[in-house]
Amino acid sequence: MQSFEWVDVTSVDQAVALLAASRPDRPVVAKAGGMDLIDLMKEGLVRPASVVNLRSIDGLDTITFDAARGLSLDALVTLARIESSPEVRREYPALAKAAAHAATPQVRNAATIGGNLLQRPRCWYLRSQHFQGRSAEAAAALASGEHQYHAIFDNSACALVHASTPATALVAYGARVHLTGPRGRERTVPLAEFLRPPRFDEDRDTTIEPDEILTRVTVPPPGANARTAYHKQTERDSYDWPICDVACVLQMDNDTVAAASIVLGWVAPTPRRAATSEQRLVGNRLTEALAREAAQAAVAGATPLAKNGFKVPILEAVVRRTLLAAVAA
């Protein structure tokens, strides 16, 4: 790891100005919790001349909830605080559970929600110095190499998967990210659109610009009759990367599903809406038979690679169990 300048900023505007001054010969990167950045620097994939420490900005780590407007998570809120927040646990239990199942307690106490959403995919080819980031060469190596934990949908170009577990729940809840750029410019993007599928001409995973900072995540009110659930399936009960995870948000009209949001994580380059499954549920009472039918629809069209076909039946089972858990809550 090469030496670099450390800058403790005191405002978003100061941080944005430093990022805007980044040059190819003197790159500037931002750090929140630093969980992913440290890994990338150790692996030699990121070689910054300056690291802008966002943790020194006061007031960028609050959680607020309003029944009319919903939930607001500042970018520096840690996953541990999301997990333990009474408001999140009461109003957004699927998000609280997703945060609680991310990484280890030590990581959750340092990792921030902003950094978690901006982390690079945990693909050993993408993260290899031998392939120089995302490329057709890396995709070819992945397709014929070790891809047991990679995508089973939308994997014709590249089979990497997004690494955030909170993202699965946040997309199901309809979350939006708030970005701040130079001269106070602000814009808001649905999280489902913020996370980008892989492209070989750009080594980016989100729509954030180089001179922007993710400052806040907002989530609309869940609704008085919402039923939600989240499940992360791993190979072992202790800390492990998921085989898949599933979040669902069901709006109920008595025993009938009035609206549904089902999101699949770790099976595609970005969290994937199970649109056909959602349509099967709406207007019907969610029985075990219907949950099984919706789960089968969720995996229809999967295109597993040679070594990750086992993810298909596991995903189907997790979708069914998550739906039934939601209506049982």
Image (cartoon, helix red, strand yellow):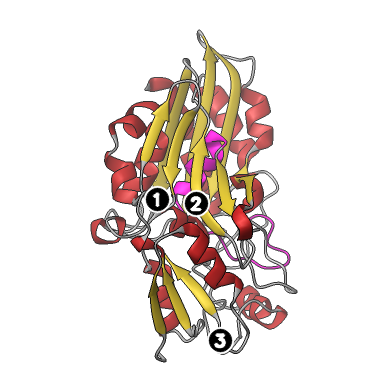
| Quadrant in which the C terminus is drawn | top left
Q: Quick one: label 3, few (<14), some, or many (20+) residues within 10 Å?
A: few
Q: Which mark is residue 60?
A: 1
Q: Is residue 314 visible?
A: no
x and y percent of residue 246 in the render?
Answer: 49, 42
The amino acid at mark 1 is Leu
Residue drawn at 68 percent across, 57 percent down: 303
x and y percent of residue 155 in the render?
Answer: 68, 62
For mark 2, what is the residue?
215
| Upstream in sequence: badge 1 or badge 2 | 1
Q: Is residue 71 visible?
A: yes
In this view, 171 is above or below 134 = above
Which residues lie in the magenta part?
153-174
| Quadrant in which the N terminus is drawn | bottom left
The amino acid at mark 2 is Thr
Do callouts 1 and 2 mark residues in contact (Cβ within 8 Å)?
yes
Q: Which mark is residue 26?
A: 3
Q: Which mark is residue 306?
A: none
The amino acid at mark 3 is Arg
Residue placed most toward the observer, 66 or 87: 66
| Disc 1 to disc 3, C-alpha distance | 27 Å
**Magenta residue check for 157:** yes
Residue drawn at 64 percent across, 68 percent down: 204
Residue placed most toward the observer, 84 or 307: 84
x and y percent of residue 184 in the render?
Answer: 60, 53
Residue placed most toward the observer, 112 or 328: 112
